[in-house]
Amino acid sequence: MATTLAPHRRLRRLRRLADYTVLSILAFVFVLPVLYLLLGSLKPSDQVLSGLTGFLPTHLSFDNYAQVLDALNSDSTGYFWRFMGVSLLVAFVVVTGGLFVNSMAAYGMSRLKWRGREAVFTLVLLLMLVPFESVAVPLFYMFNDQRNTLYIQAVPFIANAFSIYQFHTFFRKIPPSIEEAARLDGAGPWRTFFAIIVPMSKPVFASVAILTFLTQWGSFLWPVLMVSDPSVRPLPLEMSVFQGQQPPDWGQILAFGVLLVLPVLVVFAFFQRWFVQGVASSAVKG
Amino acid sequence: MHGLLMSTPAVAGIVAFVGVPFGYAVVLSFYNVRLGSPLAPTFFGLEQYRRLFTDPDLSGPFLRALLNNLTFAVVVVPLQTGLALALAILLNRKLKAIGLFRSLFFMPVVFPMTLVAVIWRLILARSDQGLLNSALHAVSFGNWGAFDWLGDAATAMASIIVLSVWQGVGFQMVILLAGLQQIPGELYEAAELDRASRRQQFRHVTLPGIRGTLVFVAMLTSVLSFRVFDQVYVLIHGGGLDEDATRTVMYQAVTTAFDQNNIGQASAITVVFFLIVVVLTLVQRRVVRPDNED
């Protein structure tokens, strides 16, 4: 046995080395664009688009960031912090409002019995199949007189069929004994939900919140249709406007890009586990 | 009754912002309706659809968009699913720092598509100072000249595909990884005792074990690939991307509604888009279900 085991082990070590090599090469290729973004945002603009030397970390400074804040600081261009504020506010309303109404609906449809429940849930499942893209045009037409408002950027996205579905999948598996105990203590369905079910369902709240935030933060199609006024313009739309300037100031454009992705990277860094779990579980069960 | 009360706000919201506009899209597609036109909408029957598919002047861009979208899907679905599977298998090991690798591959998923488009606009820049061009110049010892990747009709779609896969593959990878982790480890141990090679293990343990997830991911990717819009829009508006070679169905719907104010026609495009997505989704349910029940 010993004689066959030794080469086996050596083979294993070789394989491990091969795995690391392949992984490292792939990871390097994947990270290159991100590295380029970061370095470019810290370099003088004329040295960003300069072939392979664009990767050299020379003359690094935060000047571009200061210049972005300086360039986007008037009524005609809009204000950088306002773009950021609009994006944060819209995302905040969509995430918190969404957690509230969608979890409540999912609880009503998964744990309480009422006439028409099955029909309503089937309707939700059917509407889950309708991608936002296929209602963008009629919504644009219906709400044309509300263009350039803040609330039209948020309100249509609060109620979300997929979020309901995610909550529903989670709530369905809660053992009925918990609710029975609450009922014996005299708690009605509302108190049971807010005081017992919500606190014990943190994982699903976390993953729905993160998924909603991520989708909302990058949202582009709806702002393209509904927003032209710089005073209510969200960051991704301004990214598109800002990169279209002639001639392009690359250092500033990339600095803007870093500021655009920073909030979502922070969320990702801290809540990665919930995020990955949420994506994976909803899909595997889907 | 409490259940109904609890459900009402969200269900009302979904009906108001998804159900109603969806029905409205179908209705609008039968009308000649323009935004800001002083004329009242007139009933048009199937004229919008006839124009989209057969009118010699109007059908060109739409059919091109349909073809572009199809090309995008046909390349992206196997490419992205295959790459995601390869990454998931590589990451499904008990190696040190595997979490770091997982985060690195997943990171682009959190990048807004508008930013991804801008980064790749620089990488693929047409000047000889563009990253890809100068890299090719270096490895070909100067034989490779500058090439306009985004602006040339031959490579414009390929460019969009590459940046889309880069951004999106981590998403599919995570789903497949979760699928792989549900395969019992004993199966691999048994296979190893039987001296099955890595390739044999892949064919007889891994593939059957994640067949359902794999089909799910492929179908999900194909639905997503018909929704492509952001990167195309950003790069056409200021990025020098060849418009005709990369316009997609959603791009066509938006420009028809927004730039031409032609709501009726844009609604018809929307309905066609939805029919494609529904067919794909139904196929997905049909294919995935038998596997999920056992």
Image: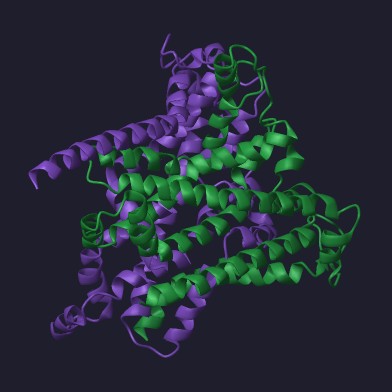
Q: Is residue B83 above or below residue A115?
A: above
In this rendered view, identify the residue nearer to me: A225 or A150: A225
Whether residue B3 sits left or right of residue B151 in the image: it is left
Residue occupying the far right of the picture = B56
Measured as percent of width and height from the top left, residue B90 is found at 34, 44
Tell me if residue A17 comes above or below residue B24 in the rendering. Answer: above
Q: Is residue A209 visible to the viewer in this orientation of the structure?
A: no
Q: Quadrant of residue B202?
A: bottom left
Q: Position of residue A270 (x, y in %)?
A: 28, 43
- Residue at the far bottom: name it: A115
Residue at the (84%, 51%) spot, across then down: B60
> Residue A87: in sight, yes or no?
yes
Q: Which quadrant does the C terminus of chain A fall into?
A: bottom left
The chain painted purple is: A
Residue A98: quadrant of the picture: bottom left
Q: Residue at x 67, y 50 (%)?
A: B71
Residue B114 or residue B24, whichever sits in front: B114
Q: Quadrant of residue B141?
A: top right
Determine the residue located farthest toward the left in the rendered image.
A2
Give the answer, above or below, for where A130 lies relative to B120.
Answer: below
Q: Position of residue B222 (x, y in %)?
A: 57, 57
Q: Would residue B95 appear left or right of B252 to someone viewing this image?
A: left
Q: Nearer the viewer, residue A99 or B198?
A: B198
Total marks shown come to 0
Residue in the picture at 38% in, 64% down: B208
B267 sits to left or right of A54: right
Colour green, chain: B
Residue displayed at 68% across by 56% down: A144
